[in-house]
Image (spheres, rainbow, N blue to C red):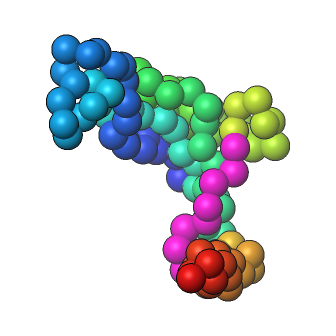
Amino acid sequence: MEVGVVKDLGIAATNSEFADLDNPHGYIYRNHYWIQAVQDDGRRYDHFYITFDKVKADALVARIQDALDGGGVLNLEDTDVWREGSPVYGSRAYQNDDCEGQHCEREWLDDSYR
């Protein structure tokens, strides 16, 4: 199992002083970080802890990795801490879950209103 930090850009705050035609709500964007565990078959689990501080996210990954290296296991069934995400593209979990078929069906449904 691999554990790492994932980064994404998201809304951190709003401030009307920053509002303009391109950003009418005055959103302030920042990188936010969270922990992701990937099983050998490609299933991904996201930790609910999200932070704007990469150092804190790296420290949590180090603690989790130390626990795993010491023989511990992650309780990925604990829905208060972890949630299952989409599997890694092309992995066994992706193929077993028929994600390609689900994607095609969603695409077809999205186009069916025309």
Q: Name the residue: 60% across, 43% down.
A: 46
Q: Position of residue 44 (x, y in %)?
A: 61, 56
Q: Main secondary structure of the magenta part?
A: loop
Picture quadrant where residue 92 is located = bottom right
Q: Position of residue 40 (x, y in %)?
A: 62, 65
The range drawn in magenta is 83-90
Picture quadrant where residue 70 is located = top right
Q: In front: 108, or 80?
A: 108
Q: Name the residue: 19% across, 14% down.
A: 17
Q: Is residue 88 magenta?
A: yes
Q: In front: 88, or 24?
A: 24
Vertical placement of residue 11 versus 82, above or below: above
Q: Is residue 64 magenta?
A: no
Q: Quadrant of the C terminus?
A: bottom right
Tell me, yes or no, if residue 69 can be seen here.
Answer: no
Q: In front: 62, or 99?
A: 99
- Left or right position of 20 against 112: left
Tell me, yes or no, if residue 86 can be seen here.
Answer: yes
